[in-house]
Image (spheres, grey):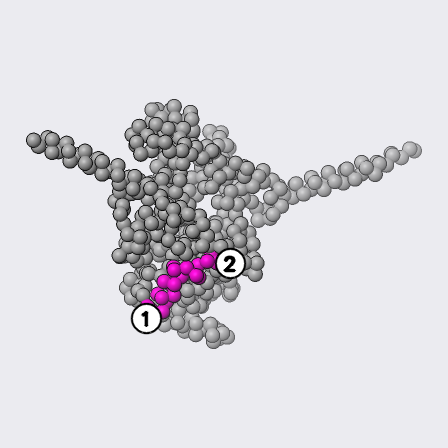
């Protein structure tokens, strides 16, 4: 009997290598989205806005369940709107898709399909991705608005790619840029006479929760750490009647167990030192929901593990690389420490020029004065003041924990934050200077944004014409 010839060494190596590659690829294909093995299927680098969730492929490439009417582009469009539609509505989107349903815009859609997010925002094409995740040339405005100088002579001679210059125009969010708004705020002082930030509800009412005890609850844990008990007994949780078990042993979704200290929390569940976001959310719904919308929490929102500091693309402290981001990352569990949450927690991780310059800034000096009682509450400026601004809701207020909500476009921060204390022109001039941002606004701005003055002049000309016509008709 003749035995088959053995494969040559080269062929054997080739077979082993191919089997190994096939094995890795198969594992990556079926591996959970939490594993880095999925990264080999990424067709290219994702944008700064999405890289945190780039391994959760289904978030954007969700199958349509056999619905043949949905094309791939429609699926992607739906994915965009699932996360961003509310923000677009809040921003009074200047170019909503519905605006182009009118057939009169058919010719414009041939230039740029403004009804599809993917016309301007594509992923995995880092080589042509600009700021704001834009993947079309920056002169896209000009193609539809090149005749703007006919109605706005002040725009005569402007560069074709200057429309989105800071203080001029944005494609979606122009809440701080429309002409009437610019004219209304023309001539404001650099620092407003009534400068003050939105106060938290407790600051508005003067209700010091650490002193006003509504429901006293004695911890029923015999071996509780005395220091932790002392800290807790001075906290807002104590004042609100939240006992140890309501956080450490509560059942998920059992809001009453947390809100009502008299209701026994899930006694059948095991004690857990790590308080999950879902537990915090029972009482802090708006803070938790906004946290999940920002970069700090967006991984949790799509089912991925918590973000680690080492994942950040911004410069971070090396000794913080291992930290995971959750509620307790910034908020100590048993004490109320606004200073830590608003400043120290940020500087415990962030290591970029802007963050490092904060402590030497005039904003930080105001914060120190507020803490010492030298100035009123609402005049000090912290990291949280600008990046997690307070939101007024009727008679109440809360802290928006989506730290990205006012970052881009920068005019969003101007209207939501800067204008609480500064005039519009001064604010535009400040955010228009990237070097000033690096030094955390340690000096007066040197750049000059002319849009406020231009809008004011245009309205002045209109008002003068109206007055002349009125005088002429009265003769």
Q: Residues within 10 Å of mark 1 (few under 14, many from 20)?
A: few
Total marks shown come to 2
Q: Is residue 12 visible?
A: yes
- Whether residue 370 is situated above or below residue 152 in the rendered picture: below
User: Tag 2's secondary structure?
Assistant: loop
- How packed mark 2 is, by other alpha carbons closer than 10 Å (few <14, some 14-19, many 20 or more), is some
Q: Are marks 1 and 2 in contact (CB under 8 Å)?
A: no
Question: Is the residue 385 above or below the residue 235 in the image?
Answer: above
Q: Position of residue 257 (x, y in %)?
A: 40, 62
Residue 459 point in image, percent of width and height: 24, 38
**Occupied quadrant, residue 7:** top right
Which residue has dot 1 on it?
212
Image quadrant in which you'd find residue 365: bottom left
Residue 386, by quadrant, is bottom left
Mark 1 vs mark 2, CA separation in Å? 34 Å
Residue lying at the far front of the rendered structure: 446
Depth check: 32 or 454 in front? 454
Q: Position of residue 407 (x, y in %)?
A: 42, 48
**Residue 359, magenta (yes or no):** yes
Taking the image as shown, residue 441 lies to the left or right of residue 17, namely left
| Residue span colored magenta | 355-374
The prevailing secondary structure element of the residues shown in magenta is: helix
Q: Is residue 110 left or right of residue 316?
A: left
The quadrant the C terminus occupies is top left
- Indicate the position of residue 111 as horizontal and vertical percent values: 42, 26
Q: Residue at x 39, y 72 (%)?
A: 234
Residue placed furthest toward the right? 1
For mark 2, what is the residue?
A: 349
Seen in the picture, residue 307 relative to 105 is either above or below; the reply is below
């Amino acid at each position: 009997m003749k035995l088959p010839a053995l494969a040559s060494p080269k062929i054997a190596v080739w077979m082993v290598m191919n089997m190994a590659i096939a094995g890795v690829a198969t594992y990556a294909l079926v591996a959970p989205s939490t594993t880095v093995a999925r990264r080999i299927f990424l067709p290219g680098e994702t944008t700064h806005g999405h890289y945190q969730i780039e391994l959760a492929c289904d978030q954007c490439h969700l199958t349509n369940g056999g619905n043949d009417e949905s094309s791939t582009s429609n699926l992607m469009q739906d994915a965009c709107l699932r996360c961003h539609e509310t923000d677009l509505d809040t921003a009074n989107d200047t170019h909503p898709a519905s605006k182009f349903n009118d057939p009169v815009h058919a010719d414009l859609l041939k230039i740029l399909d403004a009804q599809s997010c993917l016309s301007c925002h594509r992923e995995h094409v880092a080589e042509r991705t600009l700021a704001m995740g834009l993947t079309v040339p920056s002169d896209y405005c000009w193609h539809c608005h090149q005749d703007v100088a006919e109605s706005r002579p002040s725009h005569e001679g402007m560069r074709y790619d200057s429309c989105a210059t800071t203080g001029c125009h944005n494609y979606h969010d122009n809440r701080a840029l429309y002409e009437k708004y610019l004219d209304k705020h023309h001539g404001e002082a650099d620092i407003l006479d009534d400068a003050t930030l939105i106060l938290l509800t407790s600051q508005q009412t003067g209700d010091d929760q650490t002193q006003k005890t509504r429901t006293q609850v004695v911890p029923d844990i015999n071996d509780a750490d005395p220091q932790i008990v002392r800290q807790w007994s001075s906290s807002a949780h104590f004042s609100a009647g939240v006992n140890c078990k309501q956080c450490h042993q509560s059942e998920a979704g059992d809001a009453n167990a947390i809100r009502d200290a008299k209701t026994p929390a899930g006694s059948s569940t095991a004690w857990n030192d790590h308080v999950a976001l879902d537990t915090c959310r029972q009482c802090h719904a708006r803070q938790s929901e906004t946290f999940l919308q920002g970069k700090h929490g967006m991984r949790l929102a799509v089912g991925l593990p918590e973000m680690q500091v080492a994942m950040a693309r911004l410069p971070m402290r090396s000794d913080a690389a291992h930290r995971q981001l959750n509620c307790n990352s910034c908020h100590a569990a048993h004490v109320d420490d606004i200073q830590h949450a608003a400043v120290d927690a940020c500087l415990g991780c962030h290591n970029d020029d802007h963050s490092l310059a904060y402590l030497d800034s005039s904003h930080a000096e105001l914060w120190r004065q507020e803490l010492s009682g030298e100035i009123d509450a609402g005049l000090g400026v912290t990291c949280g003041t600008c990046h997690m601004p307070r939101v007024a809701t009727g008679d109440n207020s809360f802290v928006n924990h989506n730290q990205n909500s006012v970052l881009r476009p920068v005019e969003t921060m101007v209207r939501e934050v800067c204008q609480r204390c500064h005039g519009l022109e001064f604010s535009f001039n400040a955010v228009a200077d990237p070097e000033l941002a690096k030094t955390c606004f340690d000096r007066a701005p040197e750049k000059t944004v002319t849009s406020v003055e231009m809008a004011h002049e245009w309205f002045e000309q209109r008002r003068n014409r109206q007055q002349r016509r009125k005088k002429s008709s009265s003769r």
